[in-house]
Image: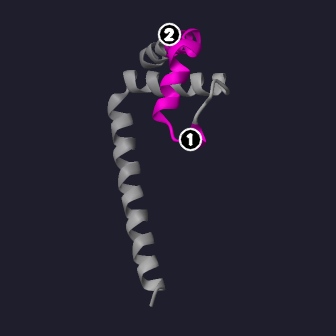
Amino acid sequence: MTIFVLWLIAFVLIFYFANKRWDISVSRGLDKMLPEVLKTHGENRMLWVIALAVLGSTTLVRPVDVLLVTILLTIIGLIVAKVARSAAGKAEF
């Protein structure tokens, strides 16, 4: 229950500050980091603020879980890339 309360407090604070500073800095910062397809251009404010709040609060409360998921997704991505490269190499012959 304590972890949930801490997560909820972190979520509310991140949501509030990201929503408050959306036009000034958050939207511009996202647009600098994201590829063209995902750029916000000031739109989809609630979607991005909620996503940032969920990721931020989870990272603050359970950083090991986030790290393990990141490592797992990286390993899966490398395996998929290697299999695709191998399949493309065999398809040429």
Say if 77 sits above or below 26 in the image. Answer: below
- In this view, the residue in front, 70 or 20, is 20
* Residue indicated by mark 2: 13
Magenta span dominant secondary structure: helix
User: Which image quarter holds the C terminus?
Assistant: bottom left
Q: Does the magenta stretch include residue 14?
A: yes
Image location of residue 15, percent across then percent down:
55, 15
- Density class for disc 1 (Cα within 10 Å; few <14, some 14-19, many ≥20) is few
* Label 2 SS: helix
Q: What span is in magenta?
A: 11-38
Per the image, the residue denoted by label 1 is 36
Image position of 44 (left or right of 52): right
| Residue 8: % across, % down | 51, 15
Which residue sits at x=49%, y=14%? Answer: 14
Query: Looking at the image, is mark 1 or mark 2 nearer the viewer?
Result: 1
Residue type at mark 1 is Glu
**The one of 16 and 29 positioned closer to us in this rendering:** 29
Marks 1 and 2, how far apart at CA: 29 Å
Vertical placement of residue 66 versus 71, above or below = above
**Where does the image place residue 39, in percent across and percent down from the top left?**
58, 35
